[in-house]
Amino acid sequence: MKLILATIIGLILSSIIYSNASAASWVYPMDSYKERLNLKEFGIFVDDDFYIGKESLFPFNRFHGYHAGVDLEIFSGEKTTKVPVYSTSTGQIIFSGNLPGYGGVILQNLDNENHTVLYGHVKIDRVKVGQKFTAGELLTYLGDGFSQETSKERKHLHFAIYEGKNLYFKGHELSLTALNAKWENPSIFLKNRGAIAPQEEKSPSILTSPSPQNAIVKEKTSFFISLIQSLKNLLIKINFYDY
């Protein structure tokens, strides 16, 4: 009886460890997410005055209205390198194609959420409609700056999350009412869901080096293993566990 009770305790704690290790995660679409938010954040009003002094960044396209997503900029050493974009959560691709103002754009319906993610100014050659990507999995790369891949925009990611499962592509809304009715602030949305930084260019299923997510799981696992051992020692002391 003593051994059975102790075994049950161990199984319960083990299941807790497993649930923490296998829980669905949320991941920021690029590394250094906060550091890349330095030009156009969510809801910023873009008018003619916004472009003054930024002509080199916007030599062709000028959009107006309330920005419906966030722009994640590249660092100085990334102008000619492949810059990865990661799936922010698990979901199916419902659109992958070229559109004016975006160049390459991908829409992903999120599992267990009535929301869709928009990734704009990206390469689309490796992403097909119907594919499913998991949180933190390499999705694609940023398109080349001032090319057809970015619709002649600078090299950056337009990242947005909107309510619903339909196809919707607006990068700016003409009113705050329209903005708030459709769009989420991506930074707040992901923070509230405990998003973590991505592991560089690796799928979570083939990780070979420590990642922030693995570190969190490892820390939780170590805690519960220690807890199991403490319970075991306690049961030994009170002569309850058949050791």
Image (cartoon, grey):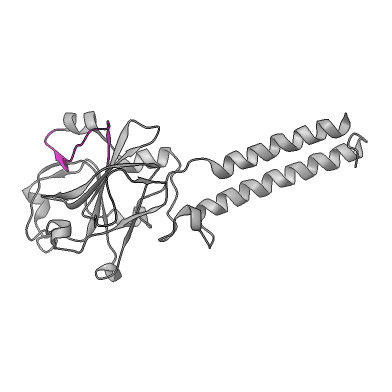
Give coordinates of residue 189: x percent, y percent. 36, 38
Residue in the image at 20% along x and 64% along y: 144
Q: Nearer the viewer, residue 55 or 232?
A: 232
Q: Which residues are magenta?
A: 161-175
Q: What is the quadrant of the N terminus in the image?
A: top right
The answer to whether 180 appears left or right of 3 in the picture is: left
The answer to whether 47 appears left or right of 82 in the picture is: left
Give coordinates of residue 197: x percent, y percent. 43, 53
Picture quarter containing residue 151?
bottom left
Residue 220 drawn in magenta:
no
Q: Is residue 231 above or below residue 157?
A: above
The answer to whether 172 appears left or right of 211 in the picture is: left
Q: Is residue 31 above or below residue 4?
A: below
Q: Main secondary structure of the magenta part?
A: loop
Residue most toward the right?
Answer: 239
Q: What is the quadrant of the C terminus in the image?
A: top right
Q: Nearer the viewer, residue 127 or 86?
A: 127
Q: Is residue 52 above or below residue 82?
A: above
Give coordinates of residue 223: x percent, y percent. 68, 46
Q: Is residue 209 above or below residue 176?
A: below
Residue 169 drawn in magenta:
yes
Q: Nearer the viewer, residue 116 or 222?
A: 116
Residue in the image at 23% along x and 31% along y: 182
Residue in the image at 80% along x and 39% along y: 231
Counting the numbered discs, the total is 0
Give coordinates of residue 115: x percent, y percent. 31, 34
Picture quarter containing residue 150?
bottom left
